[in-house]
Amino acid sequence: MTTTKIGVQLHPQATTVANLREGWKAADAMGVDSIWVWDHFYPLYGDPEAAHFEAYTLLAAMAADTSSARIGALVTCNTYRNPQLLADMSRTIDHISGGRFTLGIGSGWFERDYDEYGYDFGTAVERLHKLRDALPVIKDRLAKLTPPPLGKLPILIGGSGEKVTLRLVAQYADAWNTFGPAEHFAAKSAILDTWCDEVGRGRSEIERTVAIGPGDIDQWESLVEAGADHIIVMTGDPFDLDAVGRLQDLVRG
């Protein structure tokens, strides 16, 4: 039997808070290992003016509504919140959840969010450098907070940039997320291994997670063979928890 973890990302667009709450309660009852939202202000697909909800407010509600799955944003945009504040928000949600929060974070990419909310979009390199500068600040603030997180609050970094992002994963992260297919995942994971060796980090210290669509669950074995420890199914409303259940049966059966 494989020890591969299974998660679900519920897209907070074109939906209601009631449907989201019903979705994450159902996912938690199914025994998934993790439940995620994303951190954007507008839909990423479909009707660009559809309903949309903010991630961290949702995560606080998710923390109170669930009891077993780890929760987080896949992934937080670093530049939407002051890093000291983000650390405090994360610690507080961690306490609400009973120690189940993972701080998923990335450099950001969705230009509409920046333009409409008044953030400086800048260049991809500038956003990566801001993430590089924020990560030690976040870790330092987490260590100073009173009370501290309940146990270790893991940091997950999302992205696949070979020169900066994967080096940051090796330096600071407890987990890493990217996308399939298996060939892409394996290639990026190998580069992460090289960075781990470069900075003196044990390769096995970093959990490897991969996000896939409901139609891709039959690829799970190739993803595990490529090094994935944790498979996360991305789904919008109506949330396809049947696909998540089928993946559970395939992986655990």
Image (tube, rainbow, N blue to C red):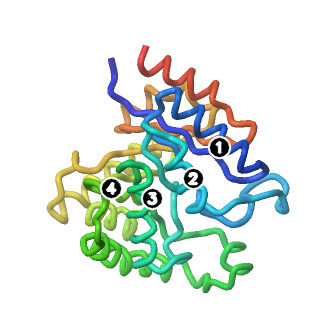
Q: Earlier in the sequence, mark 1 or mark 2?
A: 1
Image quarter hosting the C terminus: top left
Q: Earlier in the sequence, mark 1 or mark 3?
A: 1
Q: Is residue 215 left or right of residue 81?
A: right
Q: CA distance from mark 1 to mark 3?
A: 16 Å
Report which residue position mark 1 lands on: 21
Whether residue 160 is visible, yes or no, is no
Q: CA distance from mark 4 to mark 2?
A: 20 Å
Neighbour class for label 2 at 10 Å: few (<14), some, many (≥20)? Answer: some
Q: CA distance from mark 3 to mark 2?
A: 9 Å
Helix, strand, or loop for circle 1?
helix
Whether residue 42 is visible, yes or no, is yes
Q: Residue at x 29, y 55 (%)?
A: 150
Q: Earlier in the sequence, mark 3 or mark 2?
A: 2
Q: Residue at x 35, y 50 (%)?
A: 99
Q: Earlier in the sequence, mark 4 or mark 1?
A: 1
Q: Vertically, is 90 above or below 132?
A: above
Helix, strand, or loop for circle 2?
helix
Report which residue position mark 3 lands on: 93
Q: CA distance from mark 3 to mark 4?
A: 13 Å
Report which residue position mark 4 lands on: 154
Q: What's the amino acid at mark 1?
A: Arg
Contact? badges 1 and 2 (CB < 8 Å): yes
Q: Nearer the viewer, mark 3 or mark 4?
A: 3
Q: Nearer the viewer, mark 4 or mark 2?
A: 2
Q: CA distance from mark 1 to mark 2?
A: 8 Å
Q: Is residue 197 left or right of residue 57?
A: left
Report which residue position mark 2 lands on: 61
**Residue pushed farthest left?**
200
Q: Which quadrant of the figure has residue 103?
A: bottom left
Contact? badges 3 and 2 (CB < 8 Å): no
Q: Is residue 143 left or right of residue 41?
A: left
